[in-house]
Image: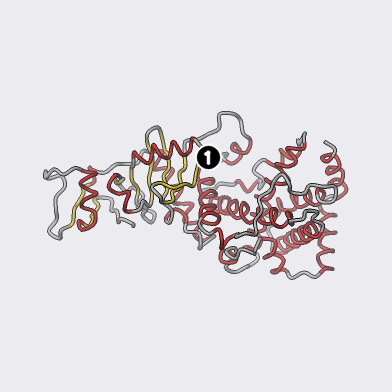
Amino acid sequence: MKIPFSHYRIRLSAIYLLVPLFFVFGCSSDETTPVAEDDTVVIVEEELERLTSAELDYMTRLLIAEEEISGLWPDFENIRACTTYIITGEGQGILMNPPDSYLAVSRPILNELEAYEEVPLFRNDILYDFAREEISRSWFYSFTEYNGLPIYVYDMTYWPTTNNFYFDYKNRNGQFHVSVFYHELFHQYSVFKNFERYIGENWIQSVQRYPITEETLPLQLLLFDVMIDAHHAETNAEKMAILQYYVSINHKLNEIDPTEDNLIRRHGFYQEKVEGAARYIEVFGTLNSLDNNTIEDPTHGYQEFADTISNRGQITIVYASRMFYHIGAGATHLLKELGFQNLDQAYMVPTNTPFSLSESFLNMDASARENALETAKSVYHWDALLERAAYLLNL
């Protein structure tokens, strides 16, 4: 339920909100809470909670990004469809989109965000304690349930206590907690809320068993580098060429997959969909709206990390996990840029992946795929990639 806020006062229907208001504001009959002739409770501005300056800044940036994201991915209901609790400070937080059952113990916050479509905001001390406890068992966000209802809890005050190149890169424009908030919220929409529509039983998340072999690793290195450029291509010809490289490499990888359960597709291609689409939303949703140019390095620091790999565990981190973020985001971006219509709806078919949609979109025959693969090897220095793969596999 959405409660219409105005800058000067809030008018709440006495029929269904009078009892919650007694809990929130007390039952006294003084004149601070007058009853209007139309049987509506009128609450004056002075009685409402206010956002702190940090909260006002954060909510403003979330709403600025929301407008951009709504255009990128219309099917994504973003912050208006999910009950969310954001920890904003010690003992303080913001509740958004609460169900009716939460209102009796929630205090409305004055709307000071008039430039944007209104979002009902509340304080709720019980949910603050719940969110703190929930996050203490996870990281700095969680998709969970409270009183049997789904809720997304997020801590905008979190920062790692040790140096972390990934966090530092993503926060270089000060937008880490906007970008990551939407990345994780996109998971709630796609994987948690729409699992059967989005991926169903096709996805096998198996980082440790994903094949990294003498045959596959050179192609994985090639794909890693090609899809960095997917984010930077300027002309349609460049975008088309990179998408052709992407399809030809992934087709070959799928063809030589040594696993019995087809992990090149069921892990790799679906990680491109699950993590790549979320990365696309966070990057392109904040790029123009908040001048958040994390697209400069689409790997968000993992390109440099890959150059310093010193053990097999790090190989797995990069080439069985992290690379799918920028690869999937790049493929999604190219499809959008090249005119693929209703991509958000196409992603809601569980058998579709960025690769399968790109393959259908381009409709390349075997000869065209082979030519594209050979061209990619020439452009991206295949011999050097073979040497690098051999070095990594000998670690």
Q: Residue at x 47, y 46 (%)?
A: 144
Left of 371 or right of it: where is 177? Answer: left
Query: In the image, what residue type sits under mark 1?
Result: Gly
Q: Residue at x 28, y 53 (%)?
A: 6
Q: Nearer the viewer, residue 387 or 147?
A: 147
Q: Residue at x 80, y 48 (%)?
A: 217
Q: Quadrant of residue 310?
A: top right
Q: Quadrant of the C terminus?
A: top right
Question: Horizontal and vertical percent for residue 236?
Answer: 69, 64
* Residue 363 against residue 59 in the figure, above or below: below
* Residue 181 against residue 252 in the figure, above or below: above
Q: Quadrant of residue 334?
A: bottom right
Q: Nearer the viewer, residue 211 or 273?
A: 211
Q: Pointer 1: what residue? A: 174
Left of 387 or right of it: where is 309? Answer: left
The 10 Å Cα crowd at callout 1, few under 14, some 14 to 19, many 20 or more, is few
Q: Quadrant of residue 357?
A: bottom right
Question: Horizontal and vertical percent for residue 361?
Answer: 69, 69
* Residue 251 against residue 59 in the figure, above or below: below
Question: Horizontal and vertical percent for residue 163?
Answer: 61, 30
Question: Horizontal and vertical percent for residue 59?
Answer: 42, 46
Q: Nearer the viewer, residue 203 or 57?
A: 203
Q: Secondary structure at mark 1?
A: loop
Q: Quadrant of the N terminus?
A: bottom left
